[in-house]
Image: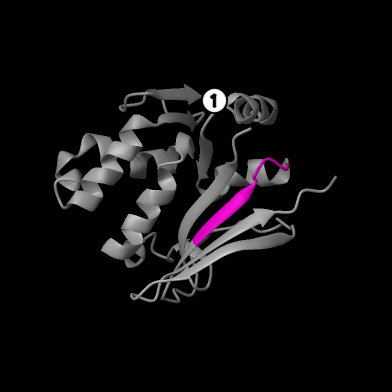
Amino acid sequence: MARLIYSMLCSLDGYIEDQNGGFDWAAPDEEVHQFVNDFERSVGTYLLGRRMYEIMQVWETDPALAANSEITRDYAEIWQSANKIVFSRTLKTVTTSKTQLIGNFDPDAIQTLKENADRDISIGGPELSTHAFRTGLVDECHIYLAPIVVGGGKRAIPDNIMGELNLLEERRFKSGFVFLRYQIKQER
């Protein structure tokens, strides 16, 4: 069975966007980006909300991003080769290949996807992940802490989510980023 992984870059105080909606402070350096790429290779499907999809689609629609370096080209190839499922009631069309648009998050359908997938599934964005956390579908959290405090904005893990975690891995980077990989303790 595939793992459902919530993966997010965030500030030390737990935000993915600052109070102005900015997140340029979370841009990883080459060492962190290569590490992210290596983890993302196991992902066969991305589950995304509308906003996260709109941010991430540039990895397919803007060739200049991939042209920046071998690391960004590698990430663009990883992104483009994976399946993408976008959950949105407002988005009418998608502009990337291997992308399916679905109106509502269905926990039973995601459980079936996990059971039948031969590669991991990544869920991105705090709003969409709330549904997966609340229904016990998330198996792991991969958190990349940026060495900055932004003081407010959009939280990486939404309020009213509670659960115990087992630390599986940690890594420190020269730039001050820290990677934390947790397994969610599932209640039996």
Residue 140 within the segment the image draws in magenta: yes
Residue 185 within the segment the image draws in magenta: no
Query: Circle 1 — which element?
Result: loop
Q: In this view, does 156 lie above or below 136?
A: below
Q: In this view, does 73 lie above or below 163?
A: above
Q: In this view, does 65 lie above or below 175?
A: above
Q: Which residue is drawn at 74% across and 58% down?
A: 162
Q: Which amino acid does label 1 sit on?
A: Gly
Place of residue 46 in the rendered image (x, y in percent of width and height, measured from the top left)? 47, 36
Q: In this view, does 98 lie to the left or right of 48?
A: left
Q: Nearer the viewer, residue 102 or 180?
A: 180
Which quadrant would the C terminus be assigned to in this image? top right
Q: Name the residue under label 1.
A: 103
Q: Is residue 47 above or below residue 139?
A: above
The mark total stands at 1
Q: Which residue is drawn at 59% across and 45% down?
A: 129
Q: Which of 65 and 53 is in front in this view?
A: 65
Q: Which residue is drawn at 34% across and 76% down?
A: 174
Place of residue 89 in the rendered image (x, y in percent of width and height, measured from the top left)? 51, 28
Place of residue 80 in the rendered image (x, y in percent of width and height, measured from the top left)? 31, 33
Q: In this view, does 182 lie to the left or right of 123?
A: right
Which quadrant would the N terminus be assigned to in this image? top right
Place of residue 106 in the rendered image (x, y in percent of width and height, measured from the top left)? 65, 28
According to the image, what is the colour scheme of the structure? one colour
Q: Residue at x 53, y 37 (%)?
A: 121
Q: In this view, does 124 lie to the left or right of 111?
A: left
Q: How crowded is mark 1: few (under 14 residues within 10 Å), some or many (20 or more)?
A: few
Q: Is residue 98 left or right of residue 72?
A: right
Q: Which residue reaches farthest right?
A: 188
Q: Give the range drawn in magenta.
A: 136-143
Q: In which quarter of the image is residue 103?
A: top right
